[in-house]
Amino acid sequence: MINAKSLIVLMTVPFAVLLPVIFYCAHRPLMVHVVFSLHHYTFLLLLFCASLLAAKLSALLGGGGLDSPAVDNVLTVVNLAVCAVYLYAAIGPVYGASGVARAGQALILTLAVGLITLGYRFILFLITLYGT
């Protein structure tokens, strides 16, 4: 658990590296990508907190909470959908994205967030396994 809290910033690095690739034509300085990545993952942490509250509420109301695959799957889909909406809204002002390309870029970034999160969890597993 300590590793999860202290290494959360690891997820921002691959996302910040992906941003200049996706928005190559925007010609933004590197720090814009870093700040956007940090800002996005701050939003995601708040979203994850809200999801945990929803799972706890599900458990209190007689559902399975996070132990239930159905609740876990629904929360995952909702988190990715909210992430996609947030990214769609955010990349317009920051990167000047518009039109169909903006939707495609938001979708690619959302999928990247999902993969980065899975990779982060796997790295945490390895660190915990070999660090104890």
Image (spheres, grey):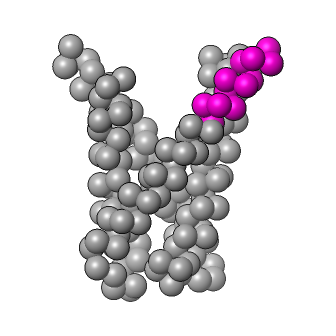
Q: Nearer the viewer, residue 119 or 5?
A: 5
Q: Main secondary structure of the magenta part?
A: helix
Q: Nearer the viewer, residue 109 or 54?
A: 54
Image quadrant occupied by the N terminus = top left
Who's the residue at 27% across and 21% down the image? Answer: 128
Who's the residue at 44% across and 46% down the image? Answer: 115
Who's the residue at 54% across and 45% down the image? Answer: 46
Image quadrant occupied by the C terminus = top left
Horizontal and vertical percent for residue 126?
26, 25
Bounds of the magenta span? 51-62
Would residue 69 be seen by someone viewing this image from the given angle? Answer: no
Q: Nearer the viewer, residue 120 or 44?
A: 44
Asked if residue 110 lies left or right of residue 16, the reply is right
Horizontal and vertical percent for residue 118?
43, 38
Say whether residue 19 is magenta: no
Would residue 123 be seen by someone viewing this image from the given angle? Answer: yes
Say whether residue 59 is magenta: yes
Asked if residue 21 lies left or right of residue 107, the reply is left
Who's the residue at 36% across and 65% down the image? Answer: 35
Looking at the image, the residue that sits furthest to the right is 61
Asked if residue 20 lies left or right of residue 75, the reply is left
Horizontal and vertical percent for residue 63?
76, 18
Is 37 situated above or below 81? below
Total numbered labels: 0
Is 19 situated above or below 94? above
Is 31 situated above or below 16? below
Horizontal and vertical percent for residue 79?
62, 45
